[in-house]
Image (cartoon, grey):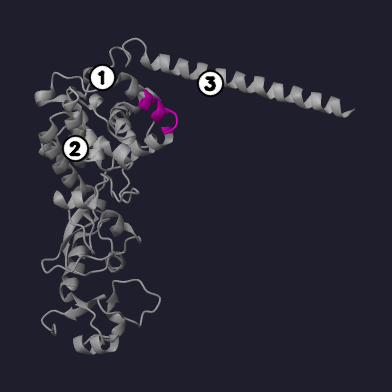
Amino acid sequence: MGPEDGLNLRKIALWILVVFGVGISILEISTRANAWTAIFSNGGLSVDYNLIAKPGLGALADGPLAERAIARAYTKEVRVQLDHLLTVKREDIRRSISLSSRYVNHMELVLKQNGLPAELAYLCIIESGYRSFARSRAGATGMWQMIRATSRRFGLRTNAWEDQRLDFAMSTEGAARYLKYLRKRFNDWDLVLAAYNAGEGRVQAAINRAKRMGLEGRFEDLRLPRETRIYVPAFYAALLVAMEPERYGIFPDYQPPLDFQEINVPGGVKLASLEAEFGTQEGVLRALNPSLIKGRVPPRKAGYSLRVPCSLDTEMVSKVVRNLDEIKWITYRVRKGDTLWDISRRYGVSAHRIDRTRKTHRPAVIFPGEILMIPVIRGLELG
């Protein structure tokens, strides 16, 4: 076989691969078209794509917005996002909906208490997938993806001991207050969602710019970042799937709601120590109290309301708490010239019982400005 014969064989093989690839692509397109025909035909979403007509979604347009079908103007955009969710993000949304059942009942209750539609609880699908420790490149944190400044503005505590954005219940309270404020300011759910994603200042500036151009200032009139233009229809698409996942071929593995009781414990207690006292698995208390970023109860005089599993024996829990009440944890800021030995003698405790709040590979070395946690018997605190 000569060189020319080898070249011809390679050309033939290449053409076979091209024809085979085109055939596969046509088959995929045909399969997807058949799937969407089944979804959108005969009374499905293609009929005016009026989301308000779907059961359970009317609450999204309550009050002064009742006459508006909130996604009517975005049929194409919502369909694009729905297609994206059901193909590229199919496993992600299945996992998110499965996890939502742990938190959504509480979220809906908080939203309703703030005069907001319960369906906004599903905003967490596109924000974080209901992951407490989700964090964006911009620093937005928690299930509701709030930045530090906004969270503090709406009543959440973020400090060296605690970040309430990580707690599903506390962060929902803050997010509800923020959404309520945005609703009052913009009175349009598309603009509310856009402002939650891009910030109310940016959305207001876009509205002002649109009105100067003679436009009404609706969402579709605004020049907003691409992420925000996708975000709004993506929420409606996620909401459609969350309300009826089986209709779209999504079969979630629903998780049971969180089951816990709250107890008041003294400030400064380590979660790991409590887990040992309660006989629970390592990490259980951290999972129920994710806002405690140091793995320790903040050193408050009034104590702290801590979540513990409902399965714990009530008498045993009470006994542990009574024993904890005999010890008080106090904070001490290291000064220049201090040593662990000097501090331990001053407070009458052994040096190994003084806890470091700072991770270090040199446990015997302390640094000026560092915070130490010192256990003392109540009534015997030294100055």
Which residue lies at the image location 35% right of the left edge and 61% below the top edge?
Answer: 282
Please say whether residue 330 is one of the residues in the magenta stretch: no
Q: Position of residue 220 (x, y in %)?
A: 25, 24
Q: Secondary structure at mark 1?
A: helix
Where is residue 273, by image quadrant?
A: bottom left
Label 3 crowd (10 A; few <14 / some 14-19 / many >=20) = few
Give the residue number, with chain letter if any, for mark 3. Answer: 28
> Is residue 255 left or right of 326 when viewed as pictured?
right
Instruction: Give the amino acid at mark 3.
Output: Glu
* Residue located farthest toward the top when viewing the structure as drawn: 42
Q: Secondary structure at mark 3?
A: helix
Q: Which mark is residue 73?
A: 1
Highlighted magenta segment, given as a residue range: 80-90
Q: Sequence-wise, which precedes: disc 2 or disc 1? A: 1
Q: Marks 2 and 3: which is nearer the front?
A: 3
Q: Position of residue 242 (x, y in %)?
A: 31, 30
Please say whether residue 84 is one of the residues in the magenta stretch: yes
Give the residue number, with chain letter if any, for mark 2. Answer: 108
From what the image shows, is residue 188 above or below residue 263? Answer: above
